[in-house]
Each structure stands twice: as C-alpha cells, then as structure tokens.
Amino acid sequence: MNNDTIQDSILLTIKHAIGGLDEEETHFDPDLIMFLNSEFTVLAQLGVGPSIPFKVEDVDTEWAEFDYQNLEAVKEYLLLRTKLIFDPPINGSVMQAYENRIQELTWRLNVFAEEIRDGE
C-alpha cells in the first residue's frame, strides 16, 4: 500500500505508528479496532466529534469520515491510548511520558470541544 492509503485509513495509520505491524498482517486488526472504538467512545463523551461514537469498521474507514477540526490531536490521542493498551512500554519513564501526554491531550481536546459548543 502506498503512503497516502496509510495516511487516509484510521486502522493503517495506527498500525504504522505503533511500529512493527505490517499493513498486510491482519491478525491483530480486530483487537486494534476494538481499542480504537473504545477510545472514540471516550472522545464522544468529551464532546469531541459526533455525539454518537464514531466507529472504525475495517481498514477502509478513513480519517475524512471523522469530521473534526483538531484532527491531528485526535490522531495522537488515539495512537497513544491504543499503544498503551496494545503494546505498553516496559520502561516506566516512557509509560509516564505517554500518560502525561494523554492527560494533556484529553484536557486540550475537551477545552477545544467546549469552545466549539460555545461558538468561540
């Protein structure tokens, strides 16, 4: 698959960013989809994206389908949350760095969602 396909597909973006997962390896796709959909539910509860949680169905589900202004922060949030669940770092300092970044992104995404709701 080409780089544009990886950047368009939610599942392939996460697989590529996690590292070590080839696009053709589909054994872990159901697990990754489950983790992603769980995190999309959290985002919906934060007011990020549609009020009905977005769902990744398969490799063909694209970022363009999740219509949100702050998409890069959403991508980073989903990557870090999925990585912590799927392939947690052994090093405690790295784990803490991921958790700190997730907390910051959660706060920023929530503030951004509130600003959108308030019309700012």
Image (cartoon, grey):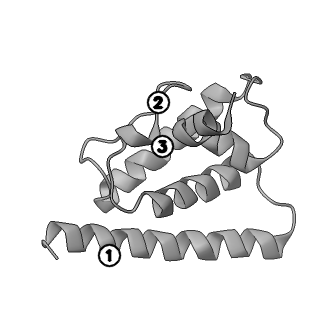
Answer with left or right where residue 14 lies relative to residue 47: right
Disc 3 from disc 2: Cα separation:
15 Å
Answer with left or right where residue 1 lies relative to residue 4: right
Location of mark 2 (residue): 61
Kindly give the residue lying farthest to the left in the view shown: 119
User: Compared to 13, does 103 lie above or below?
Assistant: below
Location of mark 3 (residue): 38
Viewport quadrant of the N terminus: top right
Q: Residue at x 41, y 34 (%)?
A: 55
Location of mark 1 (residue): 111
Q: Residue 69 in the image: x percent, y percent? A: 33, 60
Q: Earlier in the sequence, mark 3 or mark 1?
A: 3
User: Compared to 30, does 17 lie above or below?
Assistant: below
Taking depth in this image into account, of 21 and 106 the one nearest to the observer is 21
Residue type highlighted by circle 1: Val
Given this view, does label 3 or label 2 mark the residue nearer the observer?
A: 2
